Image (spheres, rainbow, N blue to C red):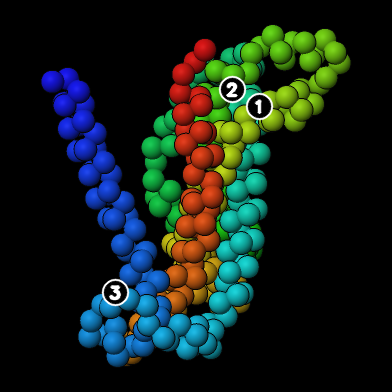
Amino acid sequence: MIKRKRCGAKVITYCVLIILFFICVIPFYLLIIGSTYDNATLASRMPMLPGKYFIENYLKMAGTIHIWRGFFNSLIVAGISTAANIYIGSLTAFGFSKYRFRWNKQLFVILLCCMMIPPRLGIIGYYQLMSEMKTLNSLPALIFPALVATTTTFWEKQYMDAYLPDALIECARIDGCNDFKIFHRIALPLVAPASATMAIFTFVETWNNFEYPLILLTSSEKFTLPLMVQTMQGVYARDYGAIYMGVTFSVIPILLIFVFCSKQIVGGLTVGAVKE
């Protein structure tokens, strides 16, 4: 009787997982399929099998926008933002985790409160700040928000509390290591799983960012890929095949990251869950 209940529970679980799988995969499948059809077909129906207009849609897209320029702009912004976010977040987490100073807990609570504030609330003030700094319409204006690494700081502090013993730091100090050497040679390598997880999330979030480039950038040469794809939507006419191609081009790097880095994501999310 117990075995039957377990088998029934497994069947239900697998059925639910299969349904969720198709719910997640079908939109991406239709997106890729849509990029292989012409505008007339897509305006009348949504095909389910691949078409023959893939190259033609790519040429239309490449003739409408500078897709590779947008790709490299997004790659520069996402890459630098991710590296800066992980380094600053790890360094701040190391300070909160291993230094006993006055107002340590209070400042960490303030940091947690800052995590609850939507970034959109500060976009007007940030625009004014960038205007005063003469950095509007530049890629650095898109990178600066990543320096506020509150989520990375919180996550990696929990990881350091669990897996970076104080005795190891004291031994390093006895051997003559200063604090920066301890951070770079001991702390940073130990938090690599958590850093990898946060790096993936930060990269994806920055790559998909649309609002900040839309508000801060005015020159098409500086546009990131999502903003450049948006410019393909005309006022009076839209080429759906070319738009599907542009969106596919923008989504594929993110899909590849999640496909090849899924183990790192799951490992980083679970490895610091239990405190030994």
**Dot 2 lies on which element?**
helix
Q: Earlier in the sequence, mark 1 or mark 3?
A: 3
In the displayed image of the protein, which residue is found farthest to the right?
176
* Closer-to-camera residue (217/192): 192
The crowd level at tag 2 (other Cα within 10 Å; few <14, some 14-19, many 20+) is many
Image vertical order of residue 244 relative to residue 27, above or below: below
The x, y position of residue 27, in whole percent, is 32, 63
Name the residue type under label 1: Leu
The crowd level at tag 1 (other Cα within 10 Å; few <14, some 14-19, many 20+) is some
Name the residue type under label 2: Met
Q: Which mark is residue 133?
A: none
Q: Which residue is mark 3?
A: 48
Q: Which residue is mark 1?
A: 190
Q: Earlier in the sequence, mark 2 or mark 1?
A: 2
Q: Where, by quadrant of the figure, is residue 123 drawn? A: bottom left
Q: Where, by quadrant of the figure, is residue 134 drawn? A: bottom right
* Closer-to-camera residue (179/200): 200
* Closer-to-camera residue (236/270): 270
The x, y position of residue 133, in whole percent, is 63, 58
> Which is more foreground, mark 2 or mark 1?
1
Residue under the point 68% across and 30% down: 188
Q: Is residue 13 visible?
A: yes
Q: Are marks 2 and 1 in contact (CB under 8 Å)?
A: yes
Residue under the point 59% across and 28% down: 93
Q: Which residue is mark 2?
A: 160
**Dot 1 lies on which element?**
helix
Q: Earlier in the sequence, mark 2 or mark 3?
A: 3
Residue under the point 58% across and 64% down: 74
Name the residue type under label 3: Met
Q: Quadrant of the N terminus?
A: top left
